[in-house]
Image (tube, helix red, strand yellow):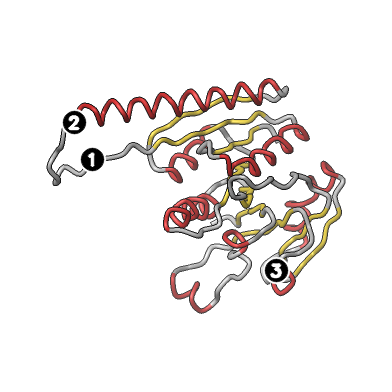
Amino acid sequence: MTNLLFPTDFSSSTTAPLNWVRLFARKTGATITLLHVYQPMIADTTLPTLGDPGLGLAASQEIEEISQQRLSQLAANLQAEGLSVVTDWRIGSVDDEILDAARETSADLIIMGRNSLSSFFDRLAGSAVSEVADSAICPVLIVPMVEEGTLAPQAQIRTIAYAMQSGTTQANVSAQTDSLVDTFDAQLQILTEDQLKNPPVDLIVMQLYPQSGFLDGLLHPNRTSALIETSDVPVLVYHQPR
């Protein structure tokens, strides 16, 4: 593993996924690409303008500069810890830019935080996580984020649960877990769907299987895929070639 991609919005709740970035970077020596995707506010031109419209532009530029400064500061903090870090600041759609950055940097792993999906805006952010997990060409580690003011759990891999599904082979399990077991000297458990509710492990590994359409998803729901949005344990997602 040589390249890690970590998209961040700088909120304090990203402490938990950032701890996992540190863990993988230290264990593998990989370079961390810190990515921030800025989404500019687009004014509604159908509404009457109050005041100087140039003020809105100035405020937007100031927010851009602040986000760039925070990205540089986070990189400097991680570099001071002895980690190899580069930065990537972009404007656009969050999920599209993350996927583009992963391709351009040849990322070996994307590490993302997932909110609790308790509000509309959390669900909007959660949809970006699901889209990246579903569409990325490299594995994606999805880490549950903690509420602000809450102590983030320690990032560690001592026990791994593999989410066994009907289409999973032993070759899949070996290919997706052998290096993790060796790198972290971890124990591996094989669990079926009915055993995956809050398992006492540090990491869950699973493979996503593409569905042929809405009807397929309706008739054959994949309860394992729901782990991406509900698990209290970080989930490492691999993909079956489409």
Which is more toward the observer, 90 or 115? 115
Query: Dot 1 corresponds to which residue?
Result: 43
Viewer-nearest of labels 3 and 1? 1
Viewer-nearest of labels 2 and 1? 2
Q: Is residue 225 above or below residue 89?
A: below
Q: Which mark is residue 197?
A: 3
Looking at the rendered structure, the kind of residue marked 2 is Pro
Q: CA distance from mark 2 to mark 1?
A: 10 Å
Q: Earlier in the sequence, mark 3 or mark 1?
A: 1
Q: Position of residue 240 (x, y in %)?
A: 60, 57
Is any part of residue 102 visible from this angle? no
Q: How many marks?
A: 3
Q: Position of residue 166 (x, y in %)?
A: 68, 71
Are discs 2 and 1 less than 8 Å apart at CB? Answer: yes
Q: Earlier in the sequence, mark 3 or mark 2?
A: 2
Q: Earlier in the sequence, mark 2 or mark 1?
A: 1
Q: Is residue 179 left or right of residue 206?
A: right
Looking at the rendered structure, the kind of residue marked 1 is Ala
Residue at horizontal 72 percent and vertical 22 percent from the top = 82
Viewer-nearest of labels 3 and 2? 2
Query: Dot 2 corresponds to which residue?
Result: 53
Looking at the rendered structure, the kind of residue marked 3 is Lys
Q: Which mark is residue 141?
A: none
| Disc 3 crowd, CA 10 A, few/some/many (<14, 14-19, 20+) | few
